[in-house]
Amino acid sequence: MSLIAELPDEYVQLAKTVREFAREEVAPRAAQHDAEHTFPYEIVAGMADLGLFGLPIPEEYGGMGGDFFALCVALEELGKVDQSVAITLEASVSLGAMPLLRHGTPEQKQTWLPRLARGELAAFGLTEPGAGSDAGGTRTRAVRDGDEWVINGSKQFITNSGTDVTALISATAVTGTADGKTQISTFLIPSGTPGLVVEPAYDKVGWHASDTHPLTFTDVRVPAANLLGEEGRGYANFLAALDEGRIAIAALAVGVAQGCVDESVRYAQDREAFGRSIAGFQAIAFKIARMEARAQAARQAYHHAAALMLGGRRFKKEAAVAKLVASEAAMDNARDATQVFGGYGFMNEYPVARHYRDSKILEIGEGTTEVQLMLIARELGL
């Protein structure tokens, strides 16, 4: 069972609200959007009405005035039923809005945060064809031309980049060198800017209802005022955003792991074989018990990392640990849930089949398993 009841009341109530929304609005539509590869505009609008996109955004910018952990609580509940919906929220808020909140100028915040808080989407343009885990290998370039920056290059695997409600893309680009090192800066690029081309969507293994495209920048011009943060600090700022983002992804993954437990318990209690419920077979019961242990351990890991972050303490290692154990718990639980369901688990009409397809990306996106191990080892002084 979830540990959410042990949290302060405001988080408990938030979880209940999002859980109800997930069960009544998201779950009934998830299979259709997944099968048709359609973006769930009506669900995104519902999340906006609940204020989920503004959870960690201050009230002065139209947000709910909560904290980052509130976002994580919502992501866990959404992750139980539909990862595509959960990642749409996570990418827009954690990777889109939060860098603006952390590093934006007062004018940038006033311009963009109210729009993002009410449900317009933001995208995070970091990954490139030749620079995935090696984000320092960025090839996209930005050159200053008077009062503008001119951007050329490409990005790939960019979530939320091509919807009808996408407002903004934050993208990294090389802006020069200093002391022999490449300087990378970040730029705010409004959707529809001339020269910005959203290429056709990917045909993905999972996350079929999540919007994901490659992007091409050809002489994209943005005002000098669209530089986000200090020139040359874009890479460092995005690394910080990824540290926070790993906690959010861990929360989403815990939702997946718990959702697989919940579905397996229900199915095992209802399904009969050899004259009795399969829940009475120790092989099934122990498999589900191990799934529950994974979900609880992963939840504790992301709660711990979030507590350190909100307390202003160093949390890089703990965020990497949370992302590592939660993504592996999601993948392992999705596999085991499919086994519990047997042949039905291989049918796309069942949520566990969708989780099985969707969960692999959790071990890749926002830092692969190998990157998390590297970060943990480095933090240990190895």
Image (cartoon, rainbow, N blue to C red):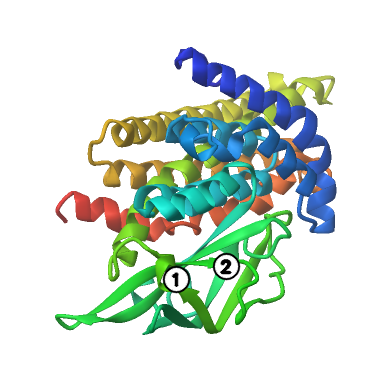
The CA distance from mark 2 to mark 1 is 10 Å
Camera-nearest residue between 87 and 179: 179
Camera-nearest residue between 261 and 127: 127
Q: Position of residue 153 (x, y in %)?
A: 49, 83
| Residue at the image point whose x is 65% and y is 52% from the top | 358
Q: Earlier in the sequence, mark 2 or mark 1?
A: 1
Left or right position of 18 against 226 = right
| Quadrant showing the C terminus | bottom left
The three-letter code of the residue at mark 2 reads Phe
Camera-nearest residue between 63 and 361: 63
Q: Position of residue 6 (x, y in %)?
A: 46, 14
The three-letter code of the residue at mark 1 reads Gly
Residue 157 has which mark? 2
User: Is disc 1 placed on a helix, strand or loop?
Assistant: loop
Is the C-beta separation of discs 2 and 1 under 8 Å? Answer: yes
| Residue at the image point whose x is 70% and y is 18% from the top | 280
Q: Is residue 177 above or below residue 270?
A: below
Q: Position of residue 31 (x, y in %)?
A: 81, 45
Q: Quadrant of residue 177?
A: bottom left
Q: Is residue 2 above or below residue 317?
A: above
Residue 132 has which mark? 1
Q: Is residue 276 above or below residue 376?
A: above
Q: How many neighbours does mark 1 have within 10 angstroms: few (below 14), some (14-19), or many (20 or more)? A: some
Left or right position of 276 against 332 = right
